[in-house]
Amino acid sequence: ENGVDVYEVCSACHLPEGWGLTDGTFPQVAGQHRGVLIKQLADIRSSNRDNPTMYPFSLPEVIGGPQALADVAAYIEKLPMNPNWGKGPWSAETPEYAQGEELYKDKCVRCHGPTGMGMPEKLYPRINGQHYNYMVRQFEWIRDGKRRNSNPDMVEQIKNFSDNDMQMVINFVSWQPVPKEHLAKSADWKNPDFK
């Protein structure tokens, strides 16, 4: 119940469903691993991750202390994901998709897994079901050193990616399936906690 109360602040940007926007302005947070959410909120709160839009909303006086972070993360993790998240421009029949798949298998699968489910125990985020435009922006910031809380191993893995490589690998990820039980039953689903 506390997670629902805290999430009310978050819902202004991430929407009551936690689905963000397909244009990538705000990420889909629904279904993300709670440890990843806690780490990102704590990093924003401590100015270890630059996010001027999020910073005021991460402060203890707005959402509460450590327990509030844990509560809202637990709530968000259980929200069903958008079945129509923003996908990249190249479908499976294109050479760009195939090149993205090759890059993913070579550079990303070790941490994010075969379908982008991540590893909650290592705080590797779930990236399947995330909006393409949001992932491209974050990837670019990580590669170019603009996201200070990035995993150093990832920075090393992607430092030589061209913009085209980046777009192709993120395109591949954006088309990876999300397990049906993690998705809302339809794109019309409304969060019953926010009527």
Image (cartoon, rainbow, N blue to C red):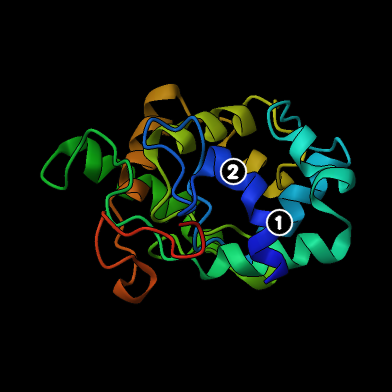
Q: Amino acid at mark 1?
A: Val
Report the residue at 82% width, 44% height from top.
62
Judged from the image, the secondary structure of the residue bearing numbered disc 1 is helix
Q: Residues within 10 Å of mark 1 (few under 14, many from 20)?
A: some
* Rendered image: mark on residue 6: 1
Judged from the image, the secondary structure of the residue bearing numbered disc 2 is helix
- The quarter holding residue 184 reads bottom left
* Front one among 136 and 37: 37
Report the residue at 56% width, 46% height from top.
11
Residue 67 in sight: yes
Residue 123 in sight: no
Please state the horizontal and vertical placement of residue 186, each as a whole percent of the image.
24, 61
* Horizontal arrangement in the rendering, residue 130 relative to residue 150 (left or right): left
Q: Amino acid at mark 2?
A: Gln
* Front one among 141 and 72: 72
Report the residue at 85% width, 54% height from top.
64
* Rendered image: mark on residue 146: none
* Rendered image: mark on residue 157: 2
